[in-house]
Amino acid sequence: MVKIGINIIPGMPVKEIIETAVAAEEIGYEYLILADEGFMQDVYVLLGAIARETKGMKLSPCTNGYTRHPAVTASAVASLNELSGGRGFLTLIAGGSVVLNPMNIAREAPLSVMRDTVEILRLLWSGEKVSYQGKRLSIKDAQITAGRQDDIHIWIAPRGEKMCQLTGEIGDAAVLTVKADLGDAFALVDQGSMKTGNKPARIFLDRIAYTPKMIEETTAFFPHVVVDTPARQLRAFIQEDQIQMIQEAIKEGGAEAAKKHVTMDMLKGYKIAGTPDECSQTFRSLVEEHRLDVYILNIVAGGFEKNVQYMRDIYKILQESGCLTA
C-alpha cells in the first residue's frame, strides 16, 4: 500500500498556496513538498503558515546545498519541525539551472555538495556543537538552538547514475520523476544501499494526464523534456532516432514544430497518461512492480479551484487502483 502527497511549485499567490495545502490534507494527501525556487514565494514563510493551518500533513521544503548553506537549512527545518509538532522533513535536489543560473552560481561537484549537505544537516541535528570539513562545504564549532532532532528524514531526488547510488548510501528516501526510468534508477539506488545497508523509501513524483486537454498540454511540453532530461533517463522512454528528430525540429521551428513528432507511447513512457481507468491500472502496476512507498502529485501552476478539482480527481483515480493506505 502507498501513501500520497503533493509537490507545489510556488508560483501562485501566498494565500492560494496555503489554501491549496489545506485542501490537499482535507482530501487525503499526507505529504506536502514545497519547492525552494529562489525567486518565487519564500518556502519557509509558507511552510510556517501551512504548519499552523494543517493538522497531520508532513511538510518539507525542496532545496539544495548551493543557494542555501546546509547550516541555514538545518536551523530552518528544525524550526519547522518544532512548529508543526514533529511533521517536518527535508527534500534535497542537486541544484537546477532555473534557480542557479540567475544567481550566477555554478553547479559544480554536485555529488560532493550533496554528501556534505547531508553530513552537515545530520551533525547539526544532533544538537551538539560540531565541526565538519567536507570537499565543498564545512562548519566550525556550530550548534543549532533547536536542540536534538532525531525524527527529521532526508529525501533525495536524484537523476544521474552516481547521484542515484549516493541516494542509496545516505538518503532516507529516493524521489524519482521519470516513469520508464523507475526500474533502472531504483536498481542504482539499491547498488548504493548495498554499500551501507541503508534502505531508503521509494518515492515517485509525477503529474498524471487523464483528460484529452491534459494530454495535449503534455504533448506541447514534451520537446522541453527532451532538451532538459539527462541522456540516461531520456533513453528509457524514447529511441535515439526519435530524440534526434525532435531535437532537429526544435532547432528549425521550436517546440511548436517539434510537438508533431510526439507520440502517445512517448508520453506514457515519461509519465502516467491515458483515460482515468488506464491511469489507475498503470498506477497499480507501478506500485506493485517498483514497491513504491509514496506517490507525490506535482502541482505546477496556479488556479485554486482547478487544482483542488485536479487533486480530487487524482485521489479518486489512485483510490480505484486499490493501492492507497486506508
Image (tube, grey):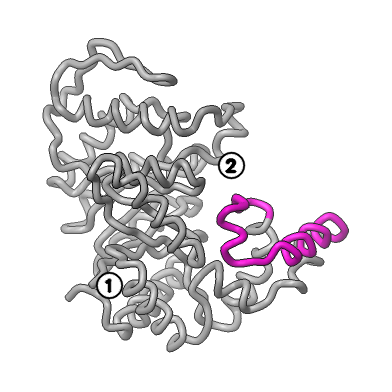
Whether residue 24 is visible to the viewer of this picture, yes or no, is: no
At x 28% / y 58%, what residue is drawn? Answer: 31
Report x, y in % for residue 25: 26, 65
Q: Is residue 233 above or below residue 122?
A: below
Report x, y in % for residue 96: 54, 41
Report x, y in % for residue 52: 21, 50
- The quadrant the N terminus occupies is bottom left
Task: Check residue 96 in the rendering and tell me which mark sits there, or answer none.
Answer: none
Report x, y in % for residue 257: 81, 66
Helix, strand or loop at label 1? It is: helix
Kindly indicate the quadrant of the structure image that contains residue 24.
Answer: bottom left
Q: Crowdedness of circle 2 by 10 Å Cα count: few (<14), some, many (20+)? A: few
Q: Is residue 306 above or below residue 59?
A: below
At x 51% / y 67%, what residue is drawn? Answer: 180
Residue topped by disc 1: 27
Whether residue 165 is visible to the viewer of this picture, yes or no, is: yes
Q: What predominant SS class does the magenta segment belong to?
A: helix
Task: Check residue 98 in the rendering and tell me which mark sits there, or answer none.
Answer: 2
The amino acid type of the residue labelled 1 equals Ile
Q: Is residue 123 above or below residue 93?
A: above
At x 35% / y 79%, what residue is drawn? Answer: 284
Left or right: where does residue 12 sit relative to residue 230?
A: left
Q: Which residues are magenta?
A: 227-253
Tell me, yes or no, whether the highlighted magenta stretch contains residue 68: no
Q: Crowdedness of circle 1 by 10 Å Cα count: few (<14), some, many (20+)? A: some
Q: Residue furthest right?
A: 252
Left or right: where does residue 182 sit relative to residue 33?
A: right
Kindly report the distance in space between the C-alpha atoms of the residues bearing marks 2 and 1. Answer: 31 Å
Q: Is residue 105 above or below residue 50?
A: above
Q: Nearer the viewer, residue 214 or 323?
A: 323
